[in-house]
Image (tube, grey):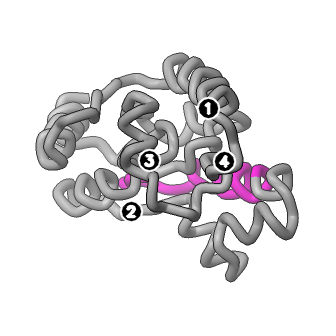
Amino acid sequence: MSDANIILIGFMGSGKSTVGRRVAKRAGYDFLDTDHQIEADTNMKVSEIFAAHGEAYFRELESRLAASLVHKTRTVVATGGGLPVLNQETLKSAGKIIWLKSTLPEILKRVRHDGSRPLLTDSQNEEKRHTLFTERESIYKSLAQFVVLTDSRPMMAIVSTILRYIQSH
């Protein structure tokens, strides 16, 4: 296995944090969840940052954190769903990019009881969610060096697929 970071991208609710922790543990890598790191750095939840300072401020925090990734090695990084939008070149230089791909209906099913997703709140209509999903999917597709489909797949099968990729690349 190389010392390269593994950068997990995908829409919110695609499993980046859960899968990332398990991949890191099995591979002997460090683990970094960008949303959790920003929450720790600001002492605020992501939803609170959005409410108090707006999305642009949050994206600036993400960009600063993304820039620091190039100084890390052997780290599995679970990015926030929107982080790749403004940080494509940074992510390319920070490690191997793996897209955890899920369908929108599956994601909505996974996060339906999670009120901490400011861009998937009940106040947003279906068309806005679909547009956001479609826009981000095109970015994920252009960045990903490897794609793992996650719908209806057992967690450990996803983890094993990623570990095989890491070992062979």
Instruction: Name the residue beneath numbered marker 1.
Output: 126
Kindly identify which numbered label has been placed on residue 119: 4
Q: Amino acid at mark 2?
A: Phe
- Lower position in the chain sequence, tag 1 or tag 2: 2
Earlier sequence position, callout 2 versus callout 3: 3
Mark 1 against mark 4, which lies toward the viewer? 1
Secondary element at image label 4? helix
**On the image, which quarter does residue 116 sit in?**
bottom right
Neighbours of disc 3 within 10 Å: few (<14), some (14-19), many (20+): many
Identify the amino acid type marked 4. Leu
- Find disc 3 in the rendering and name its residue: 13
**Does the magenta segment cover residue 89?**
no
**Residue 22 point in image, percent of width and height:** 23, 58
Tag 3–tag 1 contact (CB < 8 Å): no
Front residue of this view, candidates 105 and 44: 105
Residues at marks 4 and 3, CA–CA distance in whole angstroms? 11 Å
Element at label 2: strand
**Residue 75 magenta:** yes
Per the picture, the main secondary structure of the magenta-coloured stretch is helix
| Mark 1 / mark 4, whichever is N-terminal | 4
Pick whichever of labels 4 and 3 is earlier in the sequence.
3
For mark 2, does the 10 Å Cα neighbourhood hold few (<14), some (14 to 19), or many (20 or more) residues? many
What residue range appears in magenta? Answer: 59-77
Viewer-proximal residue among 98 and 70: 98
Percent position of residue 19, x then y = 29, 51
- In three-dimensional space, the C-alpha distance between marks 4 and 2, rounded to whole angstroms, equals 25 Å
Q: Which circle marks residue 31 in the picture? A: 2
